Image (spheres, helix red, strand yellow):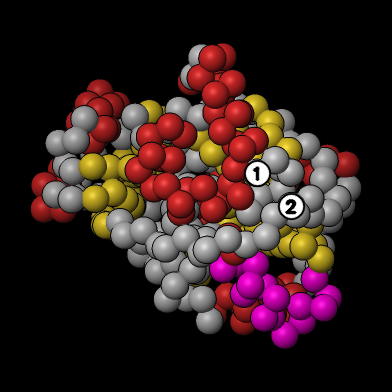
Amino acid sequence: MEILIVSGFLGAGKTTFINEFIQQQQKFENRKFAVLVNEFGDLSIDAEIIRKDSLEIIEIPSGCICCSLNASLPEAIDMVYEKIKPDVLLVEPSGVASPMNVLEAIERSKFAENFRMKAVICVVNASTFSDFIDDFGKFYVEQIRTADVVLINKADLVSDEEMREIEKEISKINPYAIAVRTQYCRHIPAISTRLNRLQSEERATGIILDSVSLAPKRKFTLHELEDFLKEMIDGKFGRIIRAKGFVECEGLCMFQISGKNYEIKTLKVDERNLAQITPKAVIIGSELKIDRLQDEF
């Protein structure tokens, strides 16, 4: 079983990468894929976005692979190998998980000798790179340092000059990684084995963020939802780093916030089996005004 770890900070585009990667692979070869998703928060959002009829989704709800659920990850991977038997397993840890801890957990798996670590992919958000590397320092750097491929996603949101500075910084952190500019994770380099030759440095300490999971009760107009997302970005409800979910809004809408950017998408009637998706949202950040958020939803 081949294993890819898809790392990256909150809102970088990990779920977009997984969808794009599987679509590209299935065009050229008939292989079975499974995705092991670890959510930050009590409600599953990423699994709904990834879910396809032909794809196995295995969720580790709540907590973070790098801490409270570290012991269960090897068992989950062994279960996937024994019962689902995919050709390729993609592991998407929480955006605040350490890839080094995930690698070590894979090595502790009972069937580790039957696994092949294909690559660690790190997705970074070009538009939040400078802020996040300042704010989250060693932790943010470790995700890049561990990677074989760094996808510099959302490249259209920064200038060429900013992009060149980001590429220089990534090269300093990890000179062995392949760094690729991309939008919506569409440019994925072929990679057959791990490239990273860097030794582990002092382990980055975890970061503490608040998370609130909500089940929206009200319906929004598109205009109301857009205004609400802008208020979240502007700090009305605390420092929100990441938000995502589904709400009733002239049909079922999916919304996302990453840094200072937001997105709203109205889902088509036949998209992602709407009958199985219920309104839900996860908000992640610091100093969250949870009561006010609950009132808005």
Whether residue 120 sits left or right of residue 135 in the image: it is right
Relative image position of residue 208 (x, y in whole percent) = 31, 60
Q: Is 103 a magenta residue?
A: yes
Can you tell which mark lies on residue 194? none
Query: What's the CA distance linking mark 1 and mark 2?
Result: 8 Å
Residue farthest toward the right in the current orientation of the protein: 29
Image-quadrant location for residue 110? bottom right
Residue farthest toward the top in the current orientation of the protein: 160
Can you tell which mark lies on residue 196? 2
- Could you tell me which residue is drawn at 83 percent across and 54 percent down? 193
Magenta stretch, residue numbers: 101-115
Mark 1 surroundings within 10 Å by alpha-carbon count, few (fewer than 14), some (14 through 19), many (20 or more)? many
- Could you tell me which residue is drawn at 58 percent across and 75 percent down? 73
Pick the front one: 116 or 292 = 116
Pick the front one: 24 or 272 = 24
Whether residue 198 sits left or right of residue 230 in the image: it is right
- Residue of label 1: 174
Most frequent secondary structure within the magenta stretch: helix
